Image (tube, helix red, strand yellow):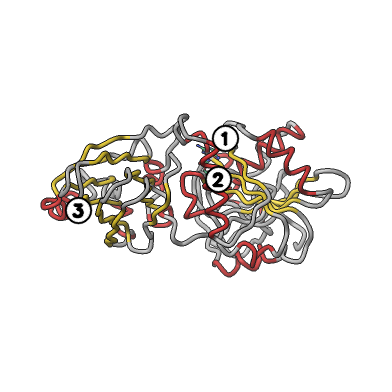
Amino acid sequence: MENMICQGCGAVIQTSDPDRPGYTPESALDNEPLLCQRCFRLKHYNDIQDVSMTDDDFLSMVGQIRNKKGLVVHLVDIFDVDGTLIKSLPRIVGDKPVVLAANKMDLLPKSTNRNKLTKWLRTAAKEAGLTVEAVYLISSAKGHGMSNLTEAIEHYRRGKDVYIVGTTNVGKSTFINKLIQRTTGAKDVITTSYFPGTTLGFIEIPLDGNSVLIDTPGIVNRKQMAHYVSDSDLKVITPKKEVKPRVYQLNSEQTLYFGGLARIDFIKGERQSFVCYFSNELAIHRTKLENADKLLNEHRGGLLSPPGPETLQKVPELTKHAFRLDKEKTDIVFPGLGWVTLPEGDITVAAHSPKGVQVSLRKSFT
Ligand code: GDP
């Protein structure tokens, strides 16, 4: 049994525990291609099954590459950089050179200043303790930026193996599928899906006679919003196309709700434009600050949704963080959901997000 690997996700095949990675009924062991039950269902019925894998399992699996030589390509989700940049990466992968690839660029408005964004990503990586050789902006779904990145990979790997590393849901499987298509023309060799935690085990793809490209399991970041919402709500909050910035001219003492999952209060300052970057399908509601709590209590799960009923069972209560901004244009980031850009000026705001999904500030790149 030891050598049997699911050809979809790379998990080691086992027949004893349906809740763990790699489970396959004995009757399916002779199937070609050999897929675990989860990948089989994903492939044939588009149905996602949950498996449990602890963070420790993930870390020890990824830690196996620590002492090997090679290049690390760290994929992050441009829509959730804070939630997907792995701060402990040097600890996990050792001192290999790292190329940072920011995926899902197709979701950002076309007007985004790419130079500014690249610089901003470099700084964000540095602040997280990561020195990167280069930064690439890509869309693995659309194939944008892939040629430049593949050239860079060839250049930086110096004949060695390549490890693709990222948190779950950054688009690692989509990225690798694209790479495979480019090199071999084969389609859908690896499972891809909407839902976090679907890439398990290592998948190796030959690059040349001596080296391979290795897909590592997605590292789970518990602080990602994706872990607190139901699959159907995840579909609403995950942008599928270019995000259209929605602009609200607000006076102080006004509040914006992003569904019922997050909220921003404009506490003090001159009338300002609040530019909101969220999935186009996520409804934004404006209300008076004095009515905001009542609105949430009465309409969370209804007018203010998502959260839908299933998410309401598991999403933590909103907690509040107050910020005073002044000098520069700033983004208030709700990890995994989106962000609000505020102009420079003396502004006090309070941001509310589910407990555990920590709001952060960053210098705006838009
Ligand atoms: P993995 O968990 O990192 O392997 O991520 P997947 O490849 O399964 O992708 C997670 C989700 O992100 C899926 O819904 C993909 O369709 C989506 N996705 C992946 N790459 C892109 C991209 O370049 N642009 C957009 N808009 N979505 C992407």
Image quarter of residue 12: bottom right
**Residue drawn at x 77%, y 59% as measured from the top left:** 3
Q: Give the percent coordinates (x, y) of residue 18.
A: 56, 60
Residue assigned mark 2 = 119
Q: Is mark 1 within 8 Å of ligand 1?
A: yes
Q: What secondary structure is found at the residue carrying circle 1?
A: loop
In front here: 305 or 263? 263
Give above or below for 37 relative to 358: above
Q: Give the percent coordinates (x, y) of residue 117.
A: 52, 42
In front here: 16 or 353? 353
Viewer-nearest of discs 1 and 2: 2
Position of the C terminus, as image quadrant, is: top left
Query: Disc 3 residue type?
Result: Ile
Separation (CA) of disc 3 from disc 1: 40 Å
Q: With 283 as the anchor, is 100 left or right in this view?
A: right
Q: Which mark is residue 267?
A: 3
User: Which quadrant of the figure shows ligand 1?
Assistant: top right
Q: Is mark 3 within 8 Å of ligand 1?
A: no
